[in-house]
Image (spheres, grey):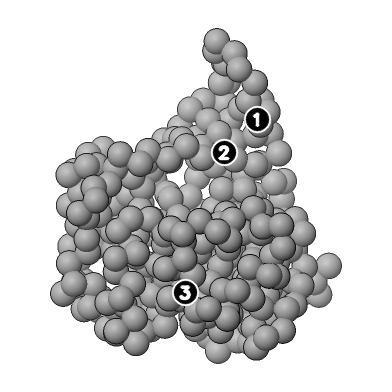
Amino acid sequence: MTGQTEATDVLVLGGAGVDTIVHVPELPLPYADSYMIDSGIRTRAGQTGDFVALGLAALGLRTHHLDLLGDDPEGDLVRALHHEHGIALTALPQPAGTKRAVNLVGPDGRRLSLYDTSRARPGDRFPEAVLRALAAASRHVHVTITQPCAEALPVLRETGVPLSTDLHDWDGENPYHEPFALAADVVFLSAAALTDPERTMRRIAERGRAATVVATAGAAGAYLLTGGALTRIPAAAPPGPVVDSNGAGDAFAAAFLHGRLSGEPPERCARFGAIAGAYACTVPAARADAIGRDELLRQAAEPSR
């Protein structure tokens, strides 16, 4: 464990792991005995918490990441990623091993993720003293929905530090996501599984603490709910060919939080998010990369299209 009480802009909780990337000819993938993968099959560090931390650090924010990691090759990849990008990491031992997933990526950049749920135990917890110390040293905490983050929410709320979370492709009904949705001050989610994004967003705001709710909608942009008003945020033009949507939502959240912590209004924060998300879609799946602050501000200064 490193630098537990150093001043931090954002503490990222959970979501550290490794993905194995497989480019497939189409999604859904038709059944066949075998497929030849000419582009190769690659394993790299980077799940939702890693990508949010990477995005925040690339934008110049002091970032600390807390999660459970195994003493295994996958855990070593995660540690190396944080070391390479100068991101403080508190890695607590996880006997079940480091979280991992297989991502099938189609030619259009869409992905299907297969998560290994055996990499957690029902009794997993973040030690309260460690959690309180890191939260107290932070301006903001971003909570991923991986285990055991739900059990950390009451302690985090007691600290008074503002919270954000990303519900990913929540359908608006799965009870697992509700504690996160109702505890956070800023809630991100994807509109992919929602038949009525506005209704779900307003339910989150009415039932929970969120003053801001953002639903990303891919090439259709995003919906921003703040102050009771719903605004449509246009998508940003990708700066290159779209090769992989993996990490786009995490990049959006990181850039939005950068704007929020810089005192920007919600609409400009969402504009930052759209630009960072579009950039992430141009990054090949086997690479971990994020837009920098100068490039983000340069694109944000241009008229939105």
Q: Quadrant of the N terminus?
A: bottom left
In which quadrant of the rendered view does residue 15 lie?
A: bottom left
How many numbered circles does the render carry? 3
Label 3 vs label 1, nearer the camera: 3
Badge 1 local density, few (<14 within 10 Å), some, or many (20+)? few
Give whichever of discs 3 and 2 has the lower sequence position.
2
In which quadrant of the rendered view does residue 130 lie?
A: bottom left
Residue at image point 24% right, 42% down: 97
Mark 2 residue element:
strand
Mark 1 residue element:
loop
The Cα–Cα distance between marks 3 and 2, rounded to whole angstroms, is: 27 Å
The Cα–Cα distance between marks 3 and 1, rounded to whole angstroms, is: 34 Å
Rendered location of residue 298, percent (x, y):
68, 73
Depicted 168 relative to depicted 117: above or below: below
Depicted 101 relative to depicted 223: above or below: above
On the rendered structure, is 300 left or right of 60? Answer: right
Residue furthest out toward the right: 305
Residue at image point 56% right, 21% down: 37
Residue at image point 22% right, 55% down: 124
Label 3 vs label 2, nearer the camera: 3
**Residue 112, numbered label:** 2
Badge 2 local density, few (<14 within 10 Å), some, or many (20+)? some
**Residue 182, numbered label:** 3
Q: What residue is pinned by disc 1?
A: 28
Q: Quadrant of the C terminus?
A: bottom right
Rendered location of residue 55, percent (x, y):
49, 63
Residue at image point 77% right, 68% down: 234
On the rendered structure, is 154 left or right of 264? Answer: left
The amino acid type, in three-letter code, at marker 1 is: Pro
The amino acid type, in three-letter code, at marker 2 is: Leu
In which quadrant of the rendered view does residue 126 lie?
A: bottom left
